[in-house]
Image (cartoon, rainbow, N blue to C red):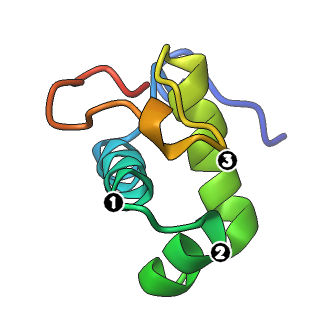
């Protein structure tokens, strides 16, 4: 019926998703726009935006002012 059982429920983001978020944060911190990040990683701008929103929700500051981007090397909780 498409419902997930208790053993298959996702607890948090996958290791790949965390790595992708760190990479997005790193590229933005280095001065790339979201569109440039998307092109560089071969993903859609919507995917980059989802990562940025997830980073911000985890307490990172990823905004239009690139000086506010979190330091991905110091964060391990980009969930």
Give residue 34's quadrant in the image: bottom right
Q: Which mark is residue 30?
A: 1
Q: Nearer the viewer, residue 60 or 30?
A: 30
| Numbered disc 3: secondary structure | helix
Spatial separation of the CA atoms under disc 1 and disc 2: 14 Å
Residue 56, x across and y down, in percent: 58, 26
Q: Residue at x 65, y 61 (%)?
A: 47
* Mark earlier in primary sequence (2, 3): 2
Q: Is the residue under label 1 in contact with that under label 3 (CB below 8 Å)? A: no
* Mark earlier in primary sequence (1, 2): 1
Q: Residue at x 59, y 43 (%)?
A: 52
58 sits left or right of 3 in the view: left
Residue 46, x across and y down, in percent: 75, 63
Give residue 28's quadrant in the image: bottom left
Q: Is the residue under label 2 in contact with that under label 1 (CB below 8 Å)? A: no
The vertical placement of 11 against 28, above or below, is above
Give residue 33's quadrant in the image: bottom right
* Mark earlier in primary sequence (3, 1): 1
Residue 12, x across and y down, in percent: 45, 24
Q: Is the residue under label 3 in contact with that under label 2 (CB below 8 Å)? A: no
- The quadrant the N terminus occupies is top right
Few, some or many C-alpha atoms within 10 Å of disc 2 (few <14, some 14-19, many ≥20)? Answer: some
Q: Which residue is mark 2?
A: 35
Few, some or many C-alpha atoms within 10 Å of disc 3 (few <14, some 14-19, many ≥20)? Answer: few
Spatial separation of the CA atoms under disc 3 and disc 1: 19 Å
Q: Which residue is mark 3?
A: 50
Q: Nearer the viewer, residue 17 or 69?
A: 69
Number of the front mark, 2 or 3: 2
| Numbered disc 1: secondary structure | loop
| Numbered disc 2: secondary structure | helix
């Amino acid at each position: 019926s498409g419902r997930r059982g208790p053993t298959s429920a996702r607890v948090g983001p996958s290791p790949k998703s965390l790595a992708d978020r760190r990479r997005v944060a790193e590229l933005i911190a280095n001065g790339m726009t979201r569109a440039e990040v998307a092109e560089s990683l071969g993903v859609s701008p919507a995917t980059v935006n989802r990562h940025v929103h997830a980073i911000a929700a985890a307490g990172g500051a990823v905004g239009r002012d690139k000086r506010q981007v979190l330091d991905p090397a110091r964060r391990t909780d980009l969930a």
